[in-house]
Amino acid sequence: MLHFGFTDLMVFSAVADEHNLTKGAAKIHLAPSSASVRIKNLEDALGLPLLNRQARGVELTKAGEIVDRYAKRAISLMGEMQQSLPVSYTHLRAHETRRHLV
């Protein structure tokens, strides 16, 4: 079973976007050391290197490109879910209120 979370994917995606660990970590308000640990744990969970670390930043490996593509999809879906919840919640609350009034 894979042991990583949504936050790990967000960290990885931010670092991938910036091609830089420090800038990617700053983008999501995380210390570079914490971002590094999360990415290392993600690599360990998947059993593959996702980044080639270089003196002036990072480059995605082929596996990193695949993970980044799926991470972006997951992030997008979470955003859609968050946008949908207030509308759904308002609809449910209105339905519950009408049911109690009858």
Image (tube, rainbow, N blue to C red):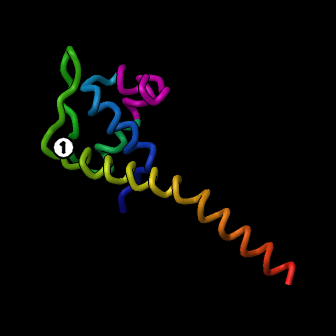
* Residue at 32 percent of width and 24 percent of height: 21
Q: Quadrant of the C terminus?
A: bottom right
Q: Looking at the magenta stretch, what is its main secondary structure?
A: helix
| Residue 32 placement (x, y as % from top left) | 41, 23
| Residue 98 placement (x, y as % from top left) | 79, 77
| Residue 28 placement (x, y as % from top left) | 45, 30
Looking at the picture, tell me which residue is in the foreground, 30 or 77: 77
> Which of the 4 image quarters holds residue 43?
top left
* Residue at 38 percent of width and 50 percent of height: 76
Q: Is residue 2 above or below residue 97?
A: above
**Would you say 62 lies left or right of 77 here?**
left
Q: Is residue 4 magenta?
A: no
Residue extending farthest right: 101
| Residue 22 placement (x, y as % from top left) | 36, 20
Looking at the picture, tell me which residue is in the foreground, 46 or 11: 11
Span shown in magenta: 22-37
* Residue at 40 percent of width and 33 percent of height: 37
Q: Is residue 28 magenta?
A: yes
Residue extending farthest left: 62
* Mark 1 nearby-residue class (10 Å; few <14, some 14–19, many ≥20): some
Residue extending farthest top: 55
Q: Is residue 93 above or below residue 38?
A: below
**Would you say 16 lies left or right of 5 here?**
left
> Which of the 4 image quarters holds residue 33?
top left
Q: Amino acid at mark 1?
A: Glu
Q: What residue would you read off at disc 1?
A: 65
Q: How many marks?
A: 1
**Would you say 38 lies left or right of 47 here?**
right
